[in-house]
Structure formats: structure tokens, C-alpha cells
Image (cartoon, rainbow, N blue to C red):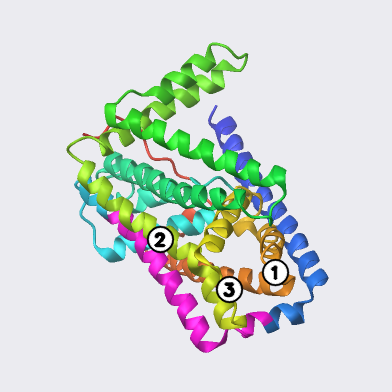
Amino acid sequence: MGGSGENKAMNAKLKRRLTIYFSTGIGGAILWAVLHWVGWRRVTQEFLSLGPLGGAVFFLNAVAMFFLWALTWKILLRSYGIERRWSEVLGAFASGYTVTYITPSANFGGEPVRVYLISHGFTDQTQEATSSVIVERFLNMMSALVLMFIGSVYGLFTDRLSFGFRWGLFGCASAGMAFLVWAIISFRHQRLWMTRGLRFIARLVPWRGYISRAADWFAVVEREIDCAFSPRRRRRTQLAFIPALLSSVLFALNPLIFFYFSAGTVLSVLDLTLIFALAMFLNMFLWVTPGGMGVIEGGLIGIFTLFGIGKAAAVGFSFALKLTEIVYVLYGIIYLFTHGTARLLHHPVSPPLGETSR
């Protein structure tokens, strides 16, 4: 039995590595094709045209974004009674970001790593740490959906998008906002509507086993977010939403900063919200390759073409973003190595989901 278990573990590890290598190869091929099509010299010229001042402003904006992400989490950690130094919060957040970035996965890829580090190896307030991460992800999703909805509304009144795409984007954003309102009402009154909905669906479809297991896991998640909206924690949750929203605003300002300093182009607030909405739609494909390599570059060309911005400038902007992301990743790698947890870069961990935090 032991040998069988070891073989399964080795096969799973090999499968993860092959997935990373394969997706990296695909991303590299797409990126090479994009650079060959656009011309790497033109891309380099656009990137360097940002200049020292523009580069400094762009980088400081990225630092402020990272700080606001971490601040959202720190407020929630304190709400759950977890007191950690800023160095621990920033390091754990960067480590989780790093694992998510380099491993093709959904947005929850590096979150167990954050829990592992902030709970000192699942030994100190693990359930509370898990709850804080769940709520932090939800608040950041809320802030992104708000800006995405604003951008999709503007998209209805512009001729930059085709008729079908503008209504498709608006439909997706509206569905997201409707889900958000429905979820908040459910959380405020502890209705567990989403879990009930999944269990109802499980009774109707042939693959009910998968949905039932998802419903069991989601019940824990939903209860944690319910608790975050309870009278005891509601004020801290609302406070944590402020830096989450500000971080989304700063992310939306990235194109304005880059193209103003590189080409003197000034994008309007409405243009920025539409770009943000389209970028959020593009982000659904980030999991395909590490860091969305190749996928993001190709997608941004399509987005910025709508605003009269050339292919080389779009890829140059993407490279500027990649550079700031690499800084986050390097910080995360250094933190993992200096704290003796470098194995988390390739060895998955799973926090235990126990009783709901109160």
C-alpha cells in the first residue's frame, strides 16, 4: 500500500512538472510569434520611451498596488485576531503571488502557501488565516467587478466594439454584478443560497458527485464570508474593501501612466474603465501559461488597437507590467528561500478546512 501511495505521489509530482513545462513552452512559442510579428526592436523602443521618470512613476504605482493588496489582507487578519508584522504579511502575500504566477492554475493556486506561511506551517490560527484569505479574494473580486461593470456600461455607447461583443461584455459584467449583489444579501442574512443552489443542481445532473463535493467545500467558504459580514466583523470587512477598491483603481491607471510618459497619449477615465473591463475579460486566460506569457501580449494588442494604440506600444506596455510582476515574484522567491520554505514552489500544500471561524 505504501509503495502504491508513493507511486501516486511521484506521478502527481511528475504531472505537475510536465504541465508547467508544457504550458511554458506554449507561452514561449506564442510570445516569440508575437515579437516576430511586431518586431522586437520596435517593442524595445516603445518600452524605453517610457523614460526614467515614467518608469519611476509606473514602478511606484505597482508598489502602491502591492501594498494595498497586502493592507486589505492585514486588516482582515486583524479582524480574525491574527497579529503579524508587516514583513510577514508582505512576504507571505508575495510568496502566494509567486506560486500562482509561475504555476498554471486558477487564482487560488498560491493561496494555501499564504495560509501556510502566515499560520507558521498550519500550526497557529490556521482556520482564521484561511478565512482571511477567502474573504480577501472575495473583496478583490468585488472591487474588480465594480470597475468592470462601469467599463462595460461605457462600452455600450462606444463604436469601438462590435455590437455582439459590447453586449456580451455588458452581459458578463451584469451577471457578475447580479451575482455579487445576490451573494452580499446572502452573506448579510446568512442564507447560504449558493450552497443550496449547488446542492439543488447536484440532484438534477448525472455528475452529482463532483457538484456535491464542490457544494461541501463551498459551504465552508460561504460560511466564512458570512462571518465576515456579521455585525462583529462587518466594520473591518468594509474597511478592508477600501484598499481593495483603490488597488483596482491603480491597476486601471497603468495604461494612462505608460502611454502618457511614452507617447504623450492621455486616456480618459471612461477609456480606462473600458480597458480595465476588457483586461479583466482577458485575465480569465491567465491560467493557460505562467503569468499569462504570450497570451496577455496578444490580447493587449487587440485591446489597445481599439484606442488607436499600435501593436509595438501595446507589447511594450505588457513588458512594463511583466517587469513589475517579476519584482513581486523575485521578492516572493527570496522570502521562500530565506525562510526555508522553497519547496512550496513545487510542492502543493492544503490548509485544513475545519469549523467556521467566529
Marks 3 and 1 sit apart, C-alpha to C-alpha, by 19 Å
Which kind of residue does numbered mark 3 sit on? Ala
The stretch in magenta equals 46-74
Q: Is residue 41 above or below residue 240?
A: below
| Left or right: 314 as drawn, with respect to 71 | right
Tell me the element at label 2. helix
Which kind of residue does numbered mark 2 sit on? Ser
Provide the residue designation for mark 2.
247
Given residues 114 and 232, the one toward you in this image is 232
Percent position of residue 314, x then y = 67, 69
Which quadrant would residue 249 be assigned to in this image?
A: bottom left
Query: Which of the labelled discs sits on residue 320, or is there none?
Result: 3
Outermost residue on the top side: it is 203
Q: Earlier in the sequence, mark 2 or mark 3?
A: 2
Residue at x-position 27% and y-position 64%: 86
Contact check, label 3 and label 1, Cβ < 8 Å: no
Residue at x-position 53% and y-position 72%: 256
Which quadrant would residue 218 be assigned to in this image?
A: top left
Provide the residue designation for mark 1.
308
Residue at x-position 37% and y-position 42%: 134
Label 3 or label 1, whichever lies nearer to me, is 1
Q: Earlier in the sequence, mark 2 or mark 1?
A: 2
| Left or right: 92 as drawn, with respect to 260 | left
Q: Earlier in the sequence, mark 3 or mark 1?
A: 1
Percent position of residue 317, x then y = 62, 72
The answer to whether residue 326 of the structure is visible from this angle is no
Marks 2 and 3 sit apart, C-alpha to C-alpha, by 18 Å
